Structure formats: structure tokens, C-alpha cells
Image (tube, grey):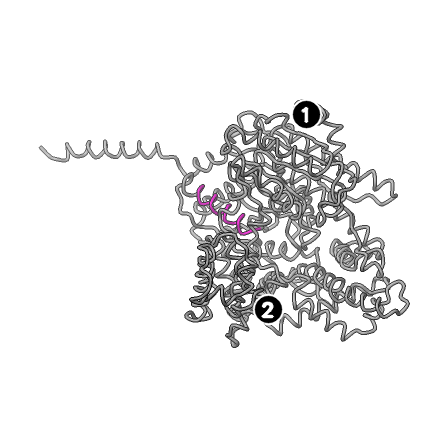
Amino acid sequence: MSDSKFTAPAIQELLDSELSERSLIPSLQEKILAIRNSLRPGQQQMADWQSGPLAISAVPGAGKSTGMAAAAAIAIARQYERSSSRRQLVVVTFTRSAAANIKAKIRKFLRDDLSLPQTGFFVYTLHGLALNIANRHSDLSGLQLENVILITPTQSHRFIRTAVEQWIANHPDVYLRLLEGHQFDGEETERLRRQSVLRTEVLPELANTVIHEAKSSGISPELLREWSKQTTDEYAILSVAAGLYEQYQKLMRSRDFIDYDDMILAALRVLENDSARQIEQNQIFAVFEDEAQDSSPLQTQLLEILASNGEYQRENSSLLTLNSSLNTDAIHRVSTHSPLNLVRVGDPNQAINSTFTPADPIYFRQFCEECDRIERLATMDRAGRSTRIIIEAANFALKWINNQWLATTKTNNKQQIPGNRQGPFRLQTIRPVEAGDPQANANPAPVGRGLELYTPRDIHHTVELLSQRVIELFGEDPTKNSAAILVRENRQGRWLAEALTPLCKEHKITLYDVGERDRRSHVPQEILALLQFCDRPHSPDYLKAALEALVQRQLIPTQDLNALVSLPEEFLYPGPLATPQPETVQKAARLCRNLLRARLELPLYQLISFLALTLNYDQAELATADKLTERVNQQIAGNSSMGGMLSALSEIVSSERFEPVETEDSEERYTRRGQLTIITMHKAKGLDWDYVFLPFLHENLIPGRFWVPPQSQFLGDFTLSEVARAQIRATLHEESIIPDVSQAWEVAKNLKTSEEYRLLYVAMTRAKLLLWMSAAQKAPFTWSKPDNLQEQAPCPVFPALKRQFPECVVNLAAMSKQV
């Protein structure tokens, strides 16, 4: 009998069994469908994207980052299926921490849900993407990264100050006109005062504002001068700004420095080259942009070129013509046949950076309108983050503010703004999620009333009421929930932290003051303090600064430092006849002597790293110290000495906002359970907590007003910098004429009012279970003097909320009786 008669059925059974097992394994399409079905309708529209342009307008709490990560993973999976090419998806977001967060989510979808390699995509910040392109084509970009230094200019930066002095020397007549202002009797004391104001405040602020606005839009000093000819103001503000900008650019080039705008410009220089552009485009199959409302014009251009799928036509080269007028007609206008593989996700109603950065939500609004015309606009309006009463309050605030804005516009007989582009909000309503939503505990039940509105007597009464509510909320299980106090200014946060620290210690509640503890600008300051001590250990001032840093880091016990520094030699090297030092003093002296020994034994380039370890820095602080070391070593190349290092560090500390290195868990530190976080409203964007407290809601801060400092009022009832900003934006927005000074000042005030109201909206929508809001009857006029209390009007939205939600107004008289 042949063996084949026995083996054939066995083989068939084996094949049948194998096929049966395979049928149980879901196909890639089934896995994609499973992810899609786990999303909300707005998120599903993003996941369904396969090509072309798509705009997603998302309300707060709609799951924007989760939806984008899912859509990105699905797009990568489809690319695996349809093509053997190695084209990548590029995902761009606003901050490094957001980039790290979305990268982790995409990887999780690829690994856990799709069983695919965690490749096929890159996640960048916009500036990181630009720098990557510029670095790959350094011959075209003009950036030799080993030879240049990145700075974050401020109005106190030495380049800005030097540019001001050089401009004054080159334009004495124009400077004299500024000095005279509206009235000037020639009195010498007043002349000196005005000179100081112009040199240290007005002109540096004008330079800093215009440089950012102009460079981020590809505008040259020459073009600013051309625009200036269309204006009639007595100071020729745009011409002055052009001269300051020109001097700044010369200084930057002569010293091999670049700023963040130079990165975008360098990348665009690369993409002007046909060959380089094709190389870059052929590596990318699509671009996904998060936080699109915060993009500037050149950033938008960069992404649109890269997303053109290799089909960018040479006739659109005017798009890339730098240092000329921004030709918005040359930017890709989306159409049903557009080669633009670009998904942009954002919320114009959360645009809160446009009055101090070049970001402008008008460009994302335009993109949304263009996509809407071809039915490529998706709206993510279902949000599961907050309880329903908080959603109702946020929606009411948005509509009330817009109605007030329109009423004011009509009252002032102003032309209505087309498409509400310059109004505070895009009309978009947050809606609760539907039944069966995939998010766990979506639109949770409120704690207490969900919305609580208080009118305390003053700011001290505010702290009492807030403290009482915090104790109640954290009482049963402090580790169960998260809470945050959102403030408009860091000074409010510092004052609150001092007031709440004893209470939090008593009730074992962790208090985290982000403004004080999470700004890593302390790294350069602390390193400088220790290095100055190492250089001059017998200086009482330097010794005290070093000891204060060590106390702050809890490396030595708190003690009377003035007694220690009065005799530095005796403290550091006590003689045999000296009075024995207490243990606390001995510990401090030993640590200081170790620092001095390291100064003698270590090479100069290792000192900062050693000091960072000595200060017991955490991972992010160590990374920031490494970045600082690299920066200082670049600046002292060719002059490697302690004096050079101290000079470079002093310059960074005194005139620059040194950017810290962010870690992936930075957001987690702000939202830990069992923690009461004090954080600014700006910093809170993108985060959420179970309980959110919004104290000090007063009209002088939200919406606030443009205030001309008394010392510069000799120039007029406006500031040069804000007038220049409004004139530049009017031109970029393709308005028919450049507004005069009075019109530009009104536009600037409207921009600020709109943004402050959007900031309040962002703050309100951070809360999940309880939103606590208050406006005290008495508050400081300025928080630099918190004890100077006076009657303060509430933010206009606050009384409107009290009228709309009377059941949420807390009766303080009844509370006091209960107590």
C-alpha cells in the first residue's frame, strides 16, 4: 500500500486547519476598521482621510490628539498596503512635549492595534522640521550648524540693544523727532529722561515686535520701507522699524547667530531649489499639522510645499520668493483636484498666542473656509471631557462675547467684519457626546453644582473660600482627583502659593507652583551663581548667591547666610583657634570647598556638568545644563577662559529667555492626582483637571486694556510697537490701505481684547467635574503691589454668567452663617 494514500489526507487536514486559524486572525483592513469604529464622528472623518486637503475644526475636549494619532496610524497602514515606497508621514505640532505625546500615541496604535512596525512617520515641532531640512541641505540653506548659535531674542537682548544704538547713530534727525514727541521745552533733565525711555524701552520693544512679525512673514526691511511710504504718521514708525530690523540682521550675520524665524527661512531657501524640493517631497506622502491656529504665514507655506506630493509646479515659485511681499494668492488654494496632501487640525477659538508671537488664526480660518467650499471641512464638536454645566457655561460665554462684540461694532458705526474673522470667536458650539461614546466616563456627573460663581469681599477672602473648597474636595481621598488654580499672571501665582502653602502642608496636599518650580530658567542662574563663587570665593555677594542656590536646592540646611558671608575666609577655611562651627555650617563649608576643588581639578568645559550633578538636578534639568554647556562652549570658542564663560553666562541670564529642555512627562507633572497645581492660563492650554479654580477675574486683566506707560506718553496715546504690528498685519491680511496711527491702535486693542476672551474660554474648558470662578470686589490695581487693594470691576462675562446660571451663584452670607 502506498504511503501517499495516508499522507495526502493528513496534509489536507493540516492545510484546512492552518487556513481556519488564519481566518481567525483579523486582516489589516479589519484592524483599521476597528480603530475607526472606536472614534467619534469628527475623529472618524479624520481617520477616513486618504488624500487631498482636509481641515478639522475641533472644540476643546473633543479628543483632537487621540483622533490625529489614530488617523496617522491608519494613514501609515494604508501606505504600507498600497505602496512599497518608503515615503513617510510627517506630523507637526506646536511644542516638544506635544510632539512626544502624539509620537507615543501613534506608536501605540501601530504596535497594539495594527501589529505593524513603529515606523513610517516622523513627528516634529515646526522649527524642528525646518532645521532638519536646512541641515540636510546646508549648501542651499546657508546654515552651517556647527558654526551658528541659536538665540531667543527679547527686547533686552544685546543684539536688540546694539541695533538700537547703531540706528540712533545713523539716524540722528529721526531720533531727535522722537525725542521731541508732542511737546518739549528743551529742559535738560527731561531730555535725559526721554533718551533713557527711548533707548531702553520704546525702541527695543519696537525692534523686537517688528523683527518677529516681519521675519515670520518673509518681509524684508526694504519692503517695510516701501510700506512706510503709504503711511502718514509723524514718526514714520514702519521706517524706523525697518532701520532697526536691518541693523539687527547685520549683527546676526556678522556674529553667526540665528533665531527661530531664520530656521523657517533657511528651509524655504532649500525648497526654492527644484532638485532639493523634489527630494524632500518624494520622502513624504502627507503632512498632518496639529494646533494649526498657531501657525505663522511662512510656517504655513513650508507645510504646503512639503505636502504637495511632488507635484509642486514651478509657476508657483513666487511662493518661495523670500524677503518680498507675501503673495497669498500664490499659496496653494485648495480645490477638488488639489495635490495638497495636508490635514490641518486646530481650533481658532483657542488661538491665544497672536498678541505676543507672529501666530495669527486668520490663516487657519481661511484654510477652513476653503476646505468648506469643497466639502473637505470636518468639525469635531462632540466633547466628553467636561460635565454638561461646564460645557453650557463655555458655550454661553462664547456667544455672549461675540454678541457684545457685534453690538459694540454697530454702536461705533464700524464696518462689520466679514466672516467674523477679526472677532473673538468662530461660531462653534461644544456638544456633549452621544450615548455609547467610546470614551470612558464621557461628560461625567458634576461635583457639587459643577459650576460655582463667587463674589468675595477681597483677594484675602478669595483665598479663604478657595482653601475651604480645596479641603472639601481633597478631604476623602487626596490621591483620587486632580486640581489646578489658573491665573492670568505669574505674580498672582506667587502670591497664591505663599498664601496656600501652610494650608496644603497641614492637610498633606501637594502644592505645585509651575511659575516658580517648572521654569528651567533657574538652571543658567544657579550655574552662574556657583561659577562666580568659584571664580571669586572671597566675595561676600558671590558667596551668598551660591549659598542661596544650595539652600534652594535643599543641599544645605536653611540658616543665617549673612552671618556666614560676613567673613568668607573664616567660613571656608577656619583656623585652629576659630570657634567650632555648628554641623549645619560645616556641611555648607564642605560643599563650598568641594566646588573650589573641582574648579582647580576639572577642565573648564566639564565644570557646568559637574555643577549640575552637584545641584542634584533631575533628568530635564541635566539635559538643560548640557544644552547650556554646548551653548557657552560655542560662544567662548577661541577664548576659553573662566572670564569668557562668566561673560557668556551673564549675558544669557540677563538678556535672554533660555529655553529649557522638555521631557516627555512634563504635562504629567502638571496634572498629577492629589496635587493642587498653580499655573497660568496660557500654560494650561492642552491640559485638564477634575477641578479648576479661576480666581481674580477682573476687567483690568480680562480683557484688560492697552495701557501707555506714563514715561512714554510724550510720544502720544499709543505705543509704537503695537501700531507697527497692526499695520504689518493689515497688509498681510490684504486690506486695501494701511491703517493710520489711530486706526492701527484701535485694531491692536481689538486684537488684545479678542485674545484675552479666548484665553478665558480656554481656561474654562480645562475643567472636567467642577469649575470654580470668582471676582473679588476689591483687588490690586497691579499685582506687583498686591496689598494695594481698591474696588475692581469684574470681567464683563462674569456678571453675565451669574445672570444666566443663578443656581450656580454661591450665597456667601448663607455660608458665613453656617460657619
Q: Is residue 103 magenta?
A: yes
Going from N to C along the chain, the mark reached first, 1 or 2, is 2
Q: Quadrant of the C terminus?
A: top right
Q: Is residue 54 visible?
A: no
Neighbourhood count class around disc 2 (C-alpha, 10 Å): few under 14, some 14–19, many 20 upward? some
The residue nearer to you, when weighing 87 against 682, is 682
Magenta highlight: main SS = helix
Q: Is residue 55 magenta?
A: no
- Identify the magenta region: 95-109
- Which one is nearer the viewer's eye here, 625 or 513? 513
Q: Nearer the viewer, residue 536 or 685?
A: 536
Amino acid type at mark 2: Phe
- Residue 266, image x and y in percent? 59, 64
Measure the alpha-carbon separation of dots 1 and 2: 60 Å
Residue 606 image offset from top left, x and y in percent = 44, 67
Closest to the camera, between mark 1 and mark 2, is: 1
Q: How far across and how far down the image is residue 536, in percent?
A: 53, 70
- Residue type, label 1: Met
Which numbered dot is residue 815? 1
Q: Is residue 83 above or below residue 764?
A: below
